[in-house]
Image: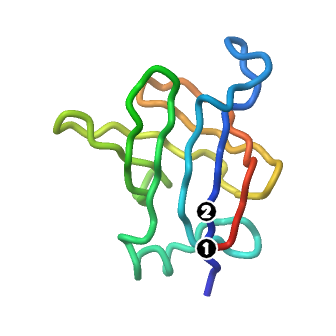
Amino acid sequence: MAQWYLVKLELAPTEDFPNGSPARAFLLRLPIKIDGSIDENERSAHPGAAFARRFWQNEPDGTGVIRLNSAGWFIAFPDDGMEFRYHLDNLKIRLGETVALTTPEGKNLPFRVVSLRAD
């Protein structure tokens, strides 16, 4: 069985943000295996326990869910009755490493794992 963690992701350096941005962040609650991957068996056994919060400067905070489909892991947020998604690419969650998220517009953004706390 995997351990549940609170994971904080902050925008890593990009062309628009050469120093990254702590004002563009996600807080995730996930069951994570020793190898850094998400434990789908544990997540599906407790689907309401896995969640995502999106903190984006000058935009309202968002609360969403983390799911798996045939295309891989994604974070889904309701937006005025419509759902928008961030796809998690090459997902291994380890402190100090980078996770790539693909935005609903198809832009790939790097996020650094700045906090990984057992929950």
Distance of label 2 from label 1 (alpha carbons):
6 Å
Residue shown at 41%/37% (left/top)? 61
Q: Secondary structure at mark 1?
A: loop
- Quadrant showing the N terminus: bottom right
- Name which quarter of the figure residue 4 lies in: bottom right
Q: Secondary structure at mark 2?
A: strand
Callout 2 touching callout 1 (CB < 8 Å): yes
Is residue 106 positioned above or below 62 on the image? Answer: above
Residue 105 screen position, x and y as percent: 43, 23
| Disc 1 target residue | 119
Residue shown at 57%/74% (left/top)? 39
In primary-sequence order, the first of circles 2 and 1 is 2
Residue 19 screen position, x and y as percent: 79, 21
Question: Foreground: 14 or 119?
Answer: 119
Residue 46 screen position, x and y as percent: 40, 78
Is residue 100 positioned above or below 1 on the image? Answer: above
Q: 10 Å neighbourhood of mark 2: few (<14), some, or many (≥20)?
A: some
- Quadrant showing the C terminus: bottom right
| Disc 2 target residue | 6
Residue shown at 80%/55% (left/top)? 95
The furthest residue to the top: 16
- Tell me which amino acid carries mark 1: Asp
Is residue 20 positioned above or below 46 on the image? Answer: above
Q: Is residue 32 left or right of residue 47?
A: right
Question: Foreground: 92 or 17?
Answer: 17
Residue 32 screen position, x and y as percent: 64, 71
Residue shown at 49%/43% (left/top)? 87
- Tell me which amino acid carries mark 2: Leu
